[in-house]
């Protein structure tokens, strides 16, 4: 047969073997507030968040009620003792699991009861719906259901009662504060047919009844915060309160059977049951679900409470924002004192210190070591058999004593990653730790030495969860002479830890970003000064952010044709990973353009154009200087940077007065090149403004101090770097420091030989003769044969490409450096020559017979060069 269910949208037919009737609440008479919650005109303004004192009046039916909550994601978030008794499923097996498939509607094996109730509830429904329990037994069940709007979505609140004992005459009623069995008006009919009962929803007539309904349902509804209970009741009250219609005429308000007669007065039964506290499953930084503590599972046969639950209790943390008033002071202190830095250890100690002794007598923070480690994560994605936790902070109220030995800071704890060890994201509340469980609990926590210290104490363990990542957990303990932790304390701990976890995660993310930025910058910055003839160089970098260890400052020294060297210092505006990335782009561009041998002002113009293509926010200052050790001059251009310091050979230092220009990326401002003579023994100091900025003083003052008696002729560049940095005001510095020091020594004229060759093929023989003669003058006859061969090949190639003339230059600068230049800008390419090819072997010979070789463009034309080690330096 089929059963019809009345609803606001029409009728619904469900196949089954038993009848079911129901009513749907009419919401048309109720106004709708701004949150979309329908409330009665009076109840909307008057329902108090706290449960009012019990005031039972008139006649009421006392029922053993099952209460079920289904979260917006379709999972069971509440399953009370009455639900266990009626349907047979223990809360351990249903809590946090999908509601679908848990209960089956009678006669319809593929129709889920809770899904059907959710469809019938628009926005409330009451009626009879037979359901099969865990063992497949048919249960005649009365239902009252409500649709509850939560921040995370729509939830279902279902209240149920077993109809069989009610129909058989076991109904108990309360008249005022007296308990009486229900007696039908016609005993004969009762014995013949039983009592006719049905579930109904009745409107709340006045404010007094609204308060009474809040009191009655508050006894069996989920143990949630006062704020959330108020939100639930503001939605339930306007939809009507549960009533039981008896014999088709008598309507009795439903009173939960958690009442007893005490001294002639009917009052709620006071139990010490530890119910699960449901909270929204999404939108909360702490998982609202909890599981039985493994210590209770492993210690089989642990005692149970009045509700049959394990004595090893669990809890779930309410959603952030639903905290009791007495939490506010502690939470405010957490907000003001925790997270003052981005250092992990400091943040963890601040979080422990704010809770001891105000909230607990002991607090410890353990973090997953892999999440904060500087080592790379394992490449194998398979789960590890163990989890390493590190205790980063401990706070204790009282003398340390044995606690220091049992729980030292910095200790690594190894936990087995299996079902025996509690998962990190499981909160735990133990009001009093019994001696029989202390050792097991200490073992599960990974600290066996803690076992003797635990008996008699109260414990709360809360996961440190932020942005969906479980960072570790925080443990709180109270001494035996202090009030044990309760569910409210657990909620407070959850709020504290939630806020602290965000700061710890900020420290973790900051560490990762700093490590990435430092790695990026190290890969882009030169590691050691290059060895370039005629100049000695030293450089140093110091980040302004000691935690980030990275910034946008850079320096470089690049060897150019003709024995020259380009010296660069730049400063990208900003700090951190982005600045380091932009710095890398600018530095690479400068190196590339320096190979073109562009004049300094022209190079800065190209760099400025590049910055505009990268984006308008990419700004940098830069000084580009080229030192010619043969002609002893320095060519510079400036892009908004502080001017360099030149210390002459006589010890007199001065700021170089060169046009400052505008920073790279500004555009519209010309760059100018300035050339100045630099005698041998001169020093050039290039730096960024972080070196000379002093709080309360201008840059000029810092530059003037830098110029005063900084350099002595006998010092090395490394000594000068150290002396300048020793004068740095580190306590006032907030910016990065890049420092480059160069000592100009020049190349002696007798160590350089240069010739201009004509455009005749006979000039190849002339080049060979000039080369052999010069090598003889330098005493390098052993290099004559190889050098002649390579010079012959390069001069031949140059004569074929040049339009006007070819230059040949030899330099004896600790190595033999040979350059052949012409006015053609096309660079020669190294290629493989086949056996019958008459050309293409020249560069191959140069590549095989020289130690180093290369090509580069000049302002006009190109240069091809190679190096040979001097005989005394040749290691064979």
Image: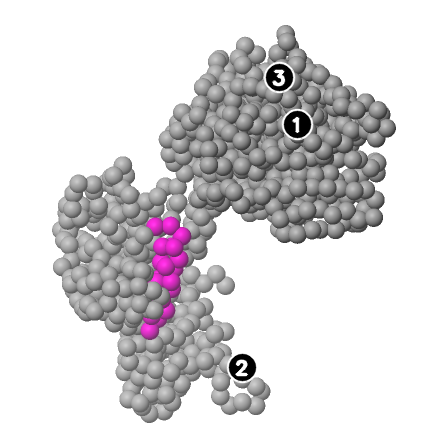
Tag of residue 347: none
Report the residue at 31% width, 84% height from top: 823
Please provide percent x and percent y for residue 869: 42, 66
Q: Position of residue 748 (x, y in %)?
A: 25, 65
Query: Mark 1 falls on what kind of element?
Result: strand
Q: Give the label on residue 252, or none.
A: 1
Drawn side of residue 612 relative to residue 143, left or right: left
Helix, strand or loop for the magenta stretch, by majority: helix
The verdict on residue 756 being magenta is: no
Q: Going 69% across and 41% down the picture, which residue do you hit?
A: 22
Q: Quadrant of residue 668?
A: bottom left
Residue 593: which quarter of the image?
bottom left
Mark found first going from the N terminus, 3 or 2:
3
SS of the residue under disc 3: loop
Magenta extent = 575-596
Sequence-wise, the earlier of marks 1 and 2 is 1
- Residue linked to disc 2: 832
> Disc 3, disc 2: CB below 8 Å?
no
Circle 3 sits on which residue?
176
Q: Residues within 10 Å of mark 3 (few under 14, many from 20)?
A: some
637 vs 248, nearest the viewer: 248
Say left or right for 536 vs 170.
left
Query: Is 591 contained in the magenta span?
Result: yes
Q: CA distance from mark 1 to mark 3?
A: 12 Å
Quick check: marks 1 and 2 in contact, CB under 8 Å? no
């Amino acid at each position: 047969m089929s059963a019809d269910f009345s609803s606001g949208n029409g009728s619904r037919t469900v196949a089954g073997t038993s009848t079911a009737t129901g009513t749907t609440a009419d919401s048309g008479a109720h106004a709708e507030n701004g949150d979309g919650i329908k409330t009665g005109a009076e109840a909307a303004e008057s329902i108090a968040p706290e449960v009012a004192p019990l005031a039972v009046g008139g006649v009421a039916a006392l029922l053993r009620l099952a209460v079920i909550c289904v979260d917006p994601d379709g999972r069971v978030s509440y399953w009370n003792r009455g639900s266990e008794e009626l349907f047979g499923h223990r809360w351990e097996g249903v809590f946090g699991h999908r509601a679908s498939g848990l209960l089956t509607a009678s006669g319809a094996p593929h129709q889920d009861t809770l899904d059907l109730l959710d469809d019938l509830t628009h926005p409330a429904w009451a009626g009879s719906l037979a359901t099969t329990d865990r063992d497949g037994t048919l249960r005649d069940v009365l239902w009252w259901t409500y649709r509850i709007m939560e921040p995370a979505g729509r939830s279902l609140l279902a209240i149920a009662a077993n109809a069989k004992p009610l129909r058989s005459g076991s109904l108990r009623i309360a008249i005022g504060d007296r308990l009486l069995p229900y007696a039908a008006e016609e005993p004969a009919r009762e014995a013949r047919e039983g009592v006719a009962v049905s579930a109904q929803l009745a409107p709340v007539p006045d404010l007094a009844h609204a308060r009474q309904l809040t009191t009655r349902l508050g006894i069996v509804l989920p143990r949630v915060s006062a704020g959330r209970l108020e939100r639930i009741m503001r939605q339930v009250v306007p939809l009507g309160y549960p009533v039981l219609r008896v014999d088709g005429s008598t309507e009795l308000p439903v009173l939960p059977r958690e009442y007893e007669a005490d001294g002639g007065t009917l009052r709620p039964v006071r139990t010490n049951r530890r119910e699960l506290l449901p909270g929204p499953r999404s939108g909360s930084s702490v998982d609202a679900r909890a599981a039985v503590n493994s210590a209770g599972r492993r210690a089989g046969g642990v005692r149970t409470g009045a509700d049959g639950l394990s004595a090893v209790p669990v809890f779930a943390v309410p959603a952030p924002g639903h905290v009791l008033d007495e939490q506010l002071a502690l939470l405010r202190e957490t907000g003001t004192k925790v997270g003052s830095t981005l250092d992990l250890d400091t943040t963890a100690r601040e979080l422990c210190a704010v809770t001891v002794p105000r909230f607990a007598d002991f607090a410890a923070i353990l973090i997953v070591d892999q999440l904060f480690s500087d080592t790379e994560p394992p490449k194998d994605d398979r789960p590890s058999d163990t989890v390493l936790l590190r205790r980063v902070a401990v706070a204790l109220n009282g003398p340390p004593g044995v606690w220091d030995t049992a729980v030292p800071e910095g200790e690594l704890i190894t936990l087995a990653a299996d079902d025996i060890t509690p998962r990190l994201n499981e909160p735990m509340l133990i009001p009093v730790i019994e001696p029989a469980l202390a050792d097991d609990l200490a073992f599960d926590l990974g600290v066996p030495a803690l076992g003797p210290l635990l008996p008699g104490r109260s414990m709360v363990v809360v996961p440190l969860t932020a942005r969906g990542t479980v960072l570790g957990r925080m443990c709180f303990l109270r001494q035996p002479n202090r009030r044990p932790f309760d569910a409210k304390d657990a909620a407070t701990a959850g709020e504290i830890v939630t806020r602290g976890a965000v700061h710890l995660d900020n420290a973790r993310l900051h560490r990762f970003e700093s490590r990435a930025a430092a790695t990026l910058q190290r890969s882009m910055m030169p590691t050691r000064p290059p060895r370039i003839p005629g100049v000695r160089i030293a450089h140093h970098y110091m980040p302004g952010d000691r935690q980030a260890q990275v910034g946008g400052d850079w320096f470089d020294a690049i060897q150019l044709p003709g024995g020259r060297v380009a010296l660069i210092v730049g400063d990208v505006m900003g700090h951190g990973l982005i600045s380091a990335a932009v710095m890398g782009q600018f530095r690479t561009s400068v190196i590339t353009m320096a190979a073109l041998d562009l004049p300094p002002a022209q190079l800065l113009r190209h760099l400025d154009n590049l910055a505009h293509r990268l984006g308008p926010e990419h700004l940098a200052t830069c000084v580009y200087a080229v030192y010619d050790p043969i002609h002893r001059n320095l060519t510079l251009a400036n892009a908004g940077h502080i001017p360099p310091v030149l210390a002459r050979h006589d010890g007199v230092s001065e700021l170089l007065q060169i046009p400052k220009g505008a920073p790279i990326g500004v555009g519209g401002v010309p760059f100018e090149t300035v050339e100045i003579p630099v005698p041998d023994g001169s020093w050039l100091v290039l730096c960024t403004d972080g070196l000379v900025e002093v709080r309360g003083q201008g840059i000029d003052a810092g530059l003037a101090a830098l110029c005063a008696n900084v350099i002595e002729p006998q010092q090395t560049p490394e000594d000068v770097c150290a002396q300048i940095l020793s004068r740095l005001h580190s306590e006032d510095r907030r910016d990065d420091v890049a420092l480059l020091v160069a000592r100009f020594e020049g190349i002696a004229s007798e160590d350089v030989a240069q010739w201009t060759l004509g455009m005749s093929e006979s000039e190849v023989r002339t080049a060979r003769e000039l080369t052999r003669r010069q090598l003889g003058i330098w005493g390098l006859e052993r290099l004559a044969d190889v050098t002649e061969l390579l010079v012959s090949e390069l001069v031949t190639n140059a004569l074929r490409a040049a339009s006007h003339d070819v230059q040949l230059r030899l330099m004896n600068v600790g190595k033999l450096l040979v350059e052949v230049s012409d006015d053609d800008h096309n660079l020669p390419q190294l290629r493989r020559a086949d056996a019958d090819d008459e050309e293409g072997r020249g560069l191959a010979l140069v590549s095989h017979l020289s130690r180093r070789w290369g090509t580069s463009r000049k302002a006009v034309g190109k240069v091809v060069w190679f190096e040979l080690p001097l005989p005394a330096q040749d290691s064979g």
